[in-house]
Amino acid sequence: MAAKPENNPFRGPPPQPAKPTAPKVPVERGAALDDDVEERLFALVSMIRAYRFRCDSVSTAYRWGYGYKVSCNQYRYNYKLSDRGGRWGVTVD
């Protein structure tokens, strides 16, 4: 009698579901991005856009104090994203 497929030791581990990936933001060639910022880039750009500022592509993004600095559209627009007492804000730099 053959072993049931779910109990077959030669099948290997069951397939894992694919990790969900964050939506992409256009990053310019040669952009300077901190490693930890890459994971948060979509959230940072979404926050900039939520404040009705323009950011079509990212030139630089890095941690700055208690927030981030992001430059967009070939360094035309520079923004500071900062945590002010638990509330995040975006200002033009």
Image (cartoon, rainbow, N blue to C red):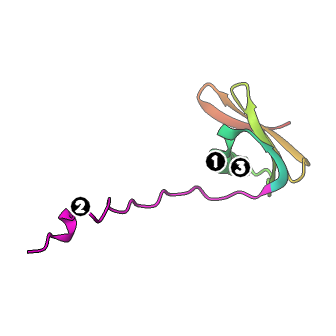
Whole-number angstrom distance, CA of label 1 to CA of label 3: 6 Å
Mark 2 and mark 3: span between their CA atoms?
A: 47 Å
Q: How many marks?
A: 3
Residue ID at (85%, 50%): 30
- In the rendering, at what x and y percent does residue 87 appear? 61, 32
Of residues 44 and 28, the one nearer the viewer is 28
- Locate residue 68 relative to residue 22 in the image: left or right: right
- Mark sitting earlier along the chain (2/1): 2
Residue at the spot 55% in from the left edge and 57% down from the top edge = 21
Q: Which residue is mark 2?
A: 9
| Residue 32 image-quadrant placement | top right
User: Between 28 and 89, which is closer to the camera in this rendering?
Assistant: 28
> How many residues crowd around disc 3 within 10 Å: few (fewer than 14), some, or many (20 or more)?
many
Q: Earlier in the sequence, mark 2 or mark 3?
A: 2
The reply to whether callout 1 and callout 3 are in contact (CB within 8 Å) is yes
Q: Secondary structure at mark 1?
A: helix
Q: Which residue is mark 1?
A: 43
> Which portion, as a residue range, is magenta?
1-27
State the CA–CA distance, disc 2 to disc 1. 43 Å
Q: Amino acid at mark 1?
A: Ala
Q: Is residue 51 magenta?
A: no
**Residue drawn at point x = 39 percent, y = 59 percent:** 16
Instruction: Give the amino acid type for the residue marked by disc 2 in the picture.
Output: Pro
Mark 2 or 3: the one toward you: 2
Question: Could you tell me the amino acid type at mark 3?
Answer: Val
User: How busy is the neighbourhood of tag 1: few (under 14 within 10 Å), some, or many (20 plus)?
Assistant: some
**Element type at mark 2:** loop
Residue at the spot 8% in from the left edge and 75% down from the top edge: 1
